[in-house]
Image (cartoon, helix red, strand yellow):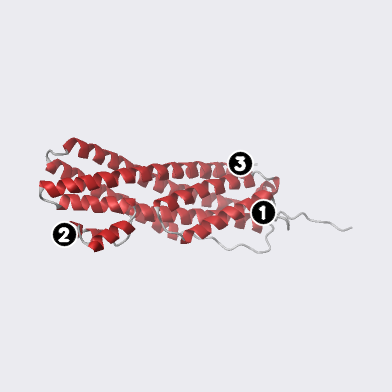
């Protein structure tokens, strides 16, 4: 008598949800080469929302649940669970960085409105507080980025019948980490930013600085504008710098709003995925 074992790998013709996951992963990977602008970051976050929505539907498939729930596959399922925790950690870091910057931006905007034409020392003090908070945010981002670099994906036994499912979810984790790495780099700004902008007050009108500001993202532009503001000594030049800082802060606030909403949606999706994995393991 011949006994037939049922494989838990995906069939030769993949389920539509599996194809959808692949399409989202491919789109996000292709977008890694695009410019790191505010709009491109928002687009990537939107893509992550769609991807993780598909992943949750993938985890609801009986095929997926059967494969991951088997006792011999518990190791792989636990590794995926650990991966979801890594994603929660990095998305929490992004949320904290965005929230802290948002609060500082709003406080600074309020101070600028109240002190316009008044005591410049108070404004300078608040600007310095903002720039100090930015240094704190950057240190936290550097720590999060270091943890990202430490993420690894142990090799699988290629004969393992759940290889397709596990690899699919690992691909999702990898592309999600890549998007958050782009976001954190965007918030932190260029690595060489402090040395470049330390000379802004002396070179504000030069073509070189104008070119640098065009290339900088909204976070770096605000840093530059504020460094320029505290570098001006005359009230006339400072008023111009205040106007510029206000404009840059308004643009940054709009940018932060979009990214805050995007990160929050992805964060909720990751939690949903983690709950689904826990339910599969507990059955």
- Residue depth check, mark 3 versus mark 2: number of the one nearer the observer: 2
- What residue is shown at x 48% (from left), y 42% (from top)? 265
- Dot 3, how many residues are within 10 Å of its Cα: few (below 14), some (14-19), or many (20+)? few
The quarter holding residue 167 reads bottom right
**Residue 126 x, y percent position in the rendering:** 20, 43
Q: Is residue 146 left or right of residue 213?
A: right
- Residue depth check, mark 2 versus mark 1: number of the one nearer the observer: 2
Q: Nearer the viewer, residue 179 or 73?
A: 179
SS at mark 3? helix
Q: Quadrant of the N terminus?
A: bottom right
Single out the residue that lies furthest toward the top: 114
Residue 80 visible? The answer is yes
**Residue 221 x, y percent position in the rendering:** 29, 52
Which label belongs to residue 72? 1
- What residue is shown at x 82% (from left), y 56% (from top)? 4
What is the spatial separation of the Cα atoms under label 3 and label 2, in whole angstroms?
60 Å
**Residue 193 x, y percent position in the rendering:** 28, 59
Which label's residue is closer to the chain start, 3 or 2?
Answer: 2
- What residue is shown at x 55% (from left), y 44% (from top)? 274
What is the spatial separation of the Cα atoms under label 3 and label 1, in whole angstroms?
17 Å
Single out the residue that lies furthest toward the left: 234
- Dot 2, how many residues are within 10 Å of its Cα: few (below 14), some (14-19), or many (20+)? few
Which label belongs to residue 202? 2
SS at mark 1? helix
Which label's residue is closer to the chain start, 3 or 1?
Answer: 1
Q: Is residue 186 above or below residue 118?
A: below
What is the spatial separation of the Cα atoms under label 2 and label 1, in whole angstroms?
66 Å
Q: Nearer the viewer, residue 1 or 110?
A: 110
Q: Quadrant of the C terminus?
A: top right
- The residue to which callout 3 is attached is 279
């Amino acid at each position: 008598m011949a006994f037939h074992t049922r494989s838990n790998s995906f069939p030769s013709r993949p389920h539509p949800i599996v194809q959808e996951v692949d399409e989202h992963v491919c789109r996000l990977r292709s977008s890694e080469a695009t410019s790191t602008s505010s709009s491109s970051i928002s687009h990537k976050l939107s893509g992550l929302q769609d991807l993780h929505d598909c992943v949750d539907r993938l985890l609801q498939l009986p095929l997926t649940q059967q494969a991951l729930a088997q006792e011999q596959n518990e190791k792989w399922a636990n590794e995926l669970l650990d991966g979801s925790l890594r994603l929660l950690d990095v998305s929490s870091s992004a949320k904290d960085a965005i929230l802290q910057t948002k609060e500082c931006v709003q406080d600074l905007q309020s101070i600028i409105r109240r002190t316009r034409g008044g005591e410049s020392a108070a404004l300078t003090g608040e600007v310095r507080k903002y720039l100090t908070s930015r240094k704190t945010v950057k240190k936290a981002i550097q720590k999060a980025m270091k943890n990202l670099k430490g993420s690894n994906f142990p090799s699988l036994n290629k004969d393992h019948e759940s290889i397709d499912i596990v690899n699919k979810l690992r691909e999702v984790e990898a592309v999600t980490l890549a998007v958050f790495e782009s976001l954190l780099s965007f918030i932190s700004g260029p690595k060489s930013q402090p040395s470049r902008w330390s000379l802004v007050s002396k070179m504000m009108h030069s073509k070189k600085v104008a070119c640098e500001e065009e290339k900088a993202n909204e976070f770096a532009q605000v840093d530059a504008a504020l460094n320029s503001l505290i570098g001006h000594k005359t009230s006339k030049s400072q008023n111009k710098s205040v106007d510029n800082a206000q404009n840059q802060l308004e643009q940054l606030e709009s940018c932060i709003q979009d990214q805050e909403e995007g990160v929050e949606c992805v964060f909720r999706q990751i939690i949903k995925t983690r709950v689904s994995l826990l339910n599969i393991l507990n059955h």
